[in-house]
Amino acid sequence: MKDFTVFDVPFPPEARQRVIVNTDAKNEADDQFAIVHAVLTPSFDLHGIIPAHFGTGKSATSMQDSYDETMLLLRLMGLEDDIRVDAGATHAMPDESTPVDSPGAQLIIEEAMKDDDRPLHIAFYGPVTDISSALLLEPKIESRNIRVLWIGGGDWPNGGREYNLSNDITAANVLMKSNLEVWQIPRTTYRTMSVGYAELIEKMYTQGEIGKYLIDQLVEHNARTRPEMEYRSLGDSPCIGIILDPECGKFSWRPAPTFDAQMHYIHSGQYRPIRVYENVNARFIHEDFFAKLAQFARRGSKL
């Protein structure tokens, strides 16, 4: 009997979700899981991956580090020639009127301007430099059917320091002042995505080279930064979950805030509403990924 997997389900091209992933892939150890999850989701029409910078505090070449990590993941999956990867900005925006042009920003513009009725989901696992730069480079995309999903911003309603926001506060303000549709997954929500070593090892370690690598790099990262930890919050994965099922968490529509230099929210009430997720269904997201990875390995690493 033929082994039936999710990759055998016929998703019509017009029904698949248009997706671009923007990732600071070498910043920590969770982006890698969300990148692979996006690649392994057959209902996604993945138009490309944009490696992003993550400031200069950890590396002077952070975007290149993210690029190299993204390509490593794709090589481990045997897909390095199948998925478009365009480099994002190498640094933050200097001010709200000066974009940082890059192949990644041009990819966003190219896809946004296509004649396609489906929303273009752009999932940001780090700073939003590339979408805000794209807006300044081509203002016409502001009226296109774009949905920006952002893992970032501090706890509502006050805010405060948050890593992804810290790497480009200026770009975040450009985005919030725009008319683009934004779905925000703030710190309080993305930090609820914890999963322990035991579960990861049981469900992933034997699932091909990519499964082993994902766990090895996570354990190594924890050993360097938080050796007491026996878990990790896969905090970028909610982007995948809410594209798959926008109702997989509780959300509310709130007037878009801006941010001060200390990353506190400024609630002026003058900008259009954004969708803010208060929680997400971590089990749905984790189990979907575990199952897709297992099926991918069982198929001999072929989509």
Image: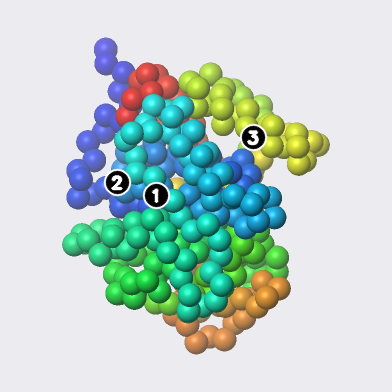
Q: What separation in Å lies between label 2 and label 1 (alpha carbons)?
A: 16 Å
What's the colour scheme?
Answer: rainbow
Mark 1 residue crowding within 10 angstroms, few (<14) / some (14–19) / many (20+): some
Q: Amino acid at mark 3?
A: Leu
What count of labels does the image hold? 3
Q: Amino acid at mark 1?
A: Asp
In this rendering, is residue 127 above or below 293?
below
Q: Residue furthest right?
A: 228
Q: What separation in Å lies between label 3 and label 2 (alpha carbons)?
A: 28 Å
Mark 1 lies on residue: 86
Q: Residue furthest top?
A: 1
Question: Of the residues under marks 2 and 1, which one precedes in the sequence?
Answer: 2
Q: Residue at point 44% right, 51% down? A: 87
Q: Is residue 234 visible?
A: no
The foreground one among 179 and 139 is: 139
Tell me the quarter of the image containing the N terminus. Answer: top left
Q: Secondary structure at mark 1?
A: loop
In this rendering, is residue 209 above or below 147?
above
Left or right of 9? Residue 198 is right
Mark 3 lies on residue: 218
Q: Residue at point 42% right, 59% down? A: 102
Mark 2 residue crowding within 10 angstroms, few (<14) / some (14–19) / many (20+): many
Q: Secondary structure at mark 3?
A: helix
Q: Residue at point 66% right, 40% down? A: 232
The answer to which image quadrant residue 55 occupies is: bottom right
Question: Of the residues under marks 3 and 2, which one precedes in the sequence?
Answer: 2
Mark 2 lies on residue: 45
Picture coordinates of residue 293, whole percent (x, y): 45, 29
The foreground one among 59 and 243 is: 59
Q: Is residue 18 visible?
A: yes
